[in-house]
Amino acid sequence: MIIARSVSELRAVLDTTKGSVGFVPTMGALHIGHRTLIEAARKNNEYVVVSIFINPTQFLPGEDLSKYPRREEADFKICELSGVDILFYPDTDMMYGKDEVSILAPDVRGYILEGASRPGHFDGVLTVVMKLFNIVRPTRAYFGKKDAQQLALITQMAENFFMNVEIIPMDTVRESDGLALSSRNVYLNTVERQEALKLSAALKKATKMVMQGNLVSEEIKRAMEEILTPLDVEYVAVVNRRFESLAQVVIGDTIVLVAARVGTTRLIDNMWM
Ligand code: AMP
């Protein structure tokens, strides 16, 4: 595995390659969720590039940027064992200059749900993904459905800017008890870890209601909120794949989402129906 810390190093390596490039952008603290993205990239492309970059522009003031988990050595090992060809590991000065042009998330989709809780977050996400795509020039890029709104906005950006990349959505990987894997789960203590199960339990309840034929969004949300009590719930939502609010679940075109704080840790999860 080659570790490239600069754009020129990465380009020099990529210039010697021929064939498809699968790309997995991450912020590190890699877990099995990230590994499944890397494995899919490995299976379907000649080269696999992973980036590890904790992108400061997607954190709002007061968010967990400085204490975001950093696991350099373990991450390098995981990438190596997963068959990554090139690990792009830039620092902030490599990625950003002063007074830059940046990408703006769309007015509606970028500012509801996650975007309402974290205004400006998606500007930072889209800007860094645009930079990374231009650096890596991937054939395919792999993103988790766990970050559903991020996935929708990146897919939209690729379309809106006629970018020559295929965005591949990947299913959420969960612990055996249902908790969606997340780098932020390390913040949870034992009691909170148990409380966090309320998110996946609420989504399971939503799935059950839909399977039993109850498609009414308000009823589903109410049942979920009951299960989520007493967590500090930021939102429960029923939307279609374009993130438009739905009064009724449309099977094959619905995402049920939840965001809640467990202690001081903010967790998100969702179910695609
Ligand atoms: P992050 O390092 O949190 O920025 O995540 C990097 C990529 O991994 C994003 O596309 C995430 O959606 C994806 N990801 C994170 N958690 C999971 C999970 N539990 N299952 C599948 N993909 C995930």
Image (cartoon, rainbow, N blue to C red):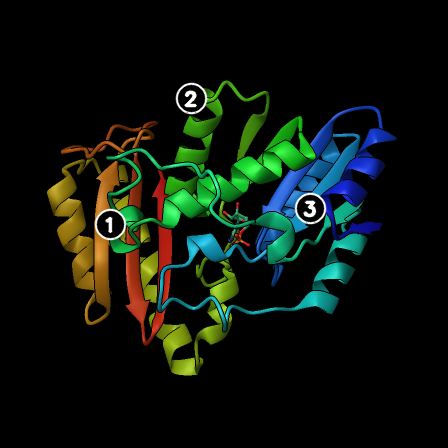
Q: Is mark 2 within 8 Å of ligand 1?
A: no
Q: CA distance from mark 2 to mark 3?
A: 24 Å
Q: Residue at x 29, y 43 (%)?
A: 256
| 209 left or right of 183 in image | left
**Would you place residue 44 above or below residue 115 in this image?**
above
| 122 left or right of 205 in image | right
Say which label, 1 or 2, has the lower sequence index: 1
Asked if one can make out residue 84 in the rendered structure from this viewpoint, the answer is no
Q: What amino acid is at disc 3?
A: Val
Which numbered marker is on residue 116? 1
Residue for badge 3:
50
Asked if one can make out residue 178 in the rendered structure from this viewpoint, the answer is yes
Q: CA distance from mark 1 to mark 2?
A: 22 Å
Q: Residue at x 41, y 27 (%)?
A: 156
**Would you place residue 241 above or below residue 257 in this image?**
above
Residue for badge 2:
160
Which numbered marker is on residue 214? none
Residue 53, horizontal then vertical, whole percent = 60, 54
Residue 176, horizontal then vertical, whole percent = 51, 61
Q: Residue at x 88, y 30 (%)?
A: 16
Q: What amino acid is at disc 2?
A: Asn
Give the quadrant of the C terminus: top left
Q: Residues within 10 Å of mark 2 (few under 14, many from 20)?
A: few
Q: Residue at x 42, y 58 (%)?
A: 59
